[in-house]
Image (spheres, rainbow, N blue to C red):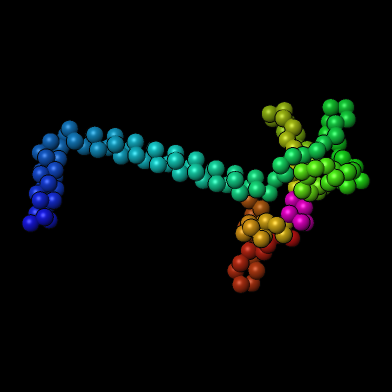
Amino acid sequence: MGIHKHLNVIDYVLSSVVRRYASHVPVMVVFTVIVFVAASFLFTIRSLSWEARRVLSFSPEITVQYLAGGRQVPVPLNLAGALRGIPGVGAARPRTWGYLYDRISGANYTVWGIGDGDVARMRSAGVSLEEGSFWEKPRRRRDGSLRPVG
C-alpha cells in the first residue's frame, strides 16, 4: 500500500503540470537556470581553491630579498647559512626567478622558477610537469605517455 501513495502523488503532480503547462514551465526553467548557475559557480570556486592550495604547498612561506635602487636583486648565497641559523627557519633554498615586462599593461611580473629539488618534491606529492607547449602538440613517448620534465 505504501508505494501506491507515492505513485498517487507523482500522478497528481504530473497531471497538474500538464493542466497548467503555460504557468509551470517558465518556473521550472527559471529554477533550472538558477541551480545550473549556482552549481557552476560552486564548482569553479572549489576547483580554483583546490588548485591554489596545491600550488601554494610548493611555494615558500617567506621570501628574503634585497632591494637596490628600488629593484629586487639576488641575495648572496653565502647568507643562506646565516638565514638557517635564525630560530624557526626550517630551510633556506635559492630560487630561480626573473622579471617579465608586459608592454600592453605596463606591468612588471615576477616569475618564479622551479629548482631541481622542487621537481623531486612535486613528484612525491603526485604533481608532474610535462614537456611541451600550449600551442604545439605534446611530445609523447613511443608508448603514448607524455615525457616528464626533469
Judged left or right of residue 19, residue 131 is right
Q: Is residue 48 visible?
A: yes
Specify start and end residues of the magenta stretch as a single range: 114-118
Q: Position of residue 134 (x, y in %)?
A: 63, 51
* Residue for point 44% across, 41% down: 42
Q: Position of residue 138 (x, y in %)?
A: 63, 59
**Image quadrant in which the C terminus is located:** bottom right
Mostly what secondary structure, the magenta segment? Answer: helix
Residue 144 within the segment the image draws in magenta: no
Residue at far front of view: 87
Q: Position of residue 27 (x, y in %)?
A: 24, 34
Q: Position of residue 29 (x, y in %)?
A: 27, 37
Say above or below: 121 vs 18.
below
Q: Nearer the viewer, residue 104 or 121?
A: 121
Q: Nearer the viewer, residue 1 or 25?
A: 1
* Residue for point 72% across, 30% down: 107
